[in-house]
Amino acid sequence: MKHLVVFTPSGKRGSFETGTPVLEAAQQLGVDLDSVCGGRGICSKCQVTPSFGDFPKHGVFVDESAVSAWNAIEQRYHDKRGLKPNRRLGCQLKIQGDLIVDVPAESQVHKQVIRKAASSRKIEMNPATKLYYVEVLEPDMHEPKGDLERLKTALAEQWNIDDTHASISIVKKLQSILRKGDWGVTVAVYSTPSESLRRIVNIWPGYHDASIYGLAIDLGSTTIAAHLTDLRSGKVIESSGVMNPQIRFGEDLMSRVSYAMMNADGASAMTNEVRKAINKLVLELAESAKIEPEDILEVVFVCNPVMHHLLLGIDPVELGQAPFALATSDALYLDAKDLNLVSLIDDARI
Ligand code: FES
């Protein structure tokens, strides 16, 4: 038997068989309902609120019996963390009659947030790095395959994520994490349209019950300002700044370029100084926000051309003379280890 289900605020609607989980109905209709654990009842990202009564606007009357009873998984989550009144887990809630389901803002992946402190633009959340919980097949003597290959298969089968790439740093810690998590792991995957490869950025045993973070850094010739941002909520959770220590090599940009021209190790000395300051800033921000630096998975830098070259370890000498050619004028995608940002994990994306 099929029942009409209407999701608010999107207004998306469709008919579903008795017993279909609300999360599955949402995914089929393309409703923006979050899930990290793939419906296993551990992440609680899929929270929804069913509404009961008469809804003439939608042509639906919703009876209390239209939803399955509160189950043990919901009770377990409620006892541990607490669910707000009338909230249910969309992956546990089964459709049994015509239904109106509200998806609260915090359960929407692409929720809109307004960041007044940084600017007043509306931003649609679409982070490049997301967490996925997967259950990986245990090794089998008769199916000789590596742990990494079985992890990739799990990502493809459970989340439709193909072509994932893992660096040697990930491969080195993979075996102990898989066993510690009893073959259940949370994987942070970074993907952007500009890169065909998807990268495994970090991995944790079991369900990683913490958020992941990004840093936005404005690297100026006088100051370095950084905003630590929660990649799930979009909130700026901490901001800080330090003086650019390169100032002792020259007050302004051109005097730093001159310093690089006149001293054989000048450019590399300035590169080392600024990277040291950034590493210190990252650790201070993580400490004051009470988060682990290993949960910072992305950093975006903006800077003028001279700061850009010096951060990347490129000699800025061409910027000091006409026609002022940049080594590259496009954005670069790097790993933290490429810039020797040792306060971050090797694979954090820059
Ligand atoms: S999808 Fe994770 S708890 Fe429902």
Image (cartoon, rainbow, N blue to C red):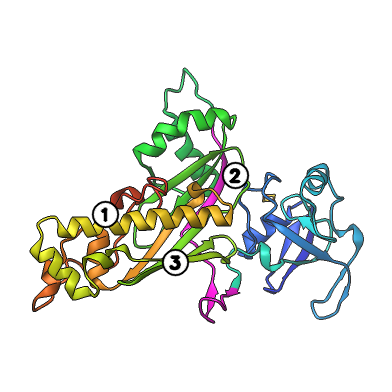
Q: Residue at x 29, y 62 (%)?
A: 332
Q: Amino acid at mark 1?
A: Asn
| Location of mark 1 (residue) | 272
Q: Is residue 187 magenta?
A: no
The reply to whether the residue tagged 1 has its Cβ within 8 angstroms of ligand 1 is no
Q: Give me the C-alpha separation between circle 3 and circle 1.
A: 18 Å
Is the residue marked by circle 2 packed among few (<14), some (14-19), or many (20+) residues within 10 Å? Answer: many
Q: Give me the C-alpha separation between circle 2 and circle 1.
A: 34 Å
Q: Which residues are magenta?
A: 113-137
Q: Which of the two residues, 81 or 48, is positioned nearer the viewer here?
A: 81
Q: Which of the two residues, 245 or 335, is positioned nearer the viewer here?
A: 245
Question: Residue 251 in the image: x percent, y percent?
Answer: 24, 73
SS assignment at label 2:
loop
Is residue 108 left or right of 242 when viewed as pictured?
right
| Location of mark 2 (residue) | 208
Q: Of the numbered discs in the image, which one, if any, rests on residue 241?
A: 3
Quarter of the picture holding the C terminus = bottom left
Q: Of the numbered discs in the image, which one, if any, rests on residue 325?
A: none
Height in image: 320 above or below 16?
below
Is residue 247 left or right of 237 when viewed as pictured?
left
Q: Amino acid at mark 2?
A: His
Quarter of the picture holding the N terminus = bottom right
Q: Amino acid at mark 3?
A: Gly
Question: Residue 120 in the image: x percent, y percent?
Answer: 54, 82
| Labels 3 and 1: the sequence-earlier one | 3
Is residue 137 left or right of 314 when viewed as pictured?
right
Is residue 5 left or right of 198 when viewed as pictured?
right
Asked whether disc 2 touches disc 3, contact meaning CB atoms under 8 Å apart, the reply is no
Q: Residue at x 81, y 63 (%)?
A: 50
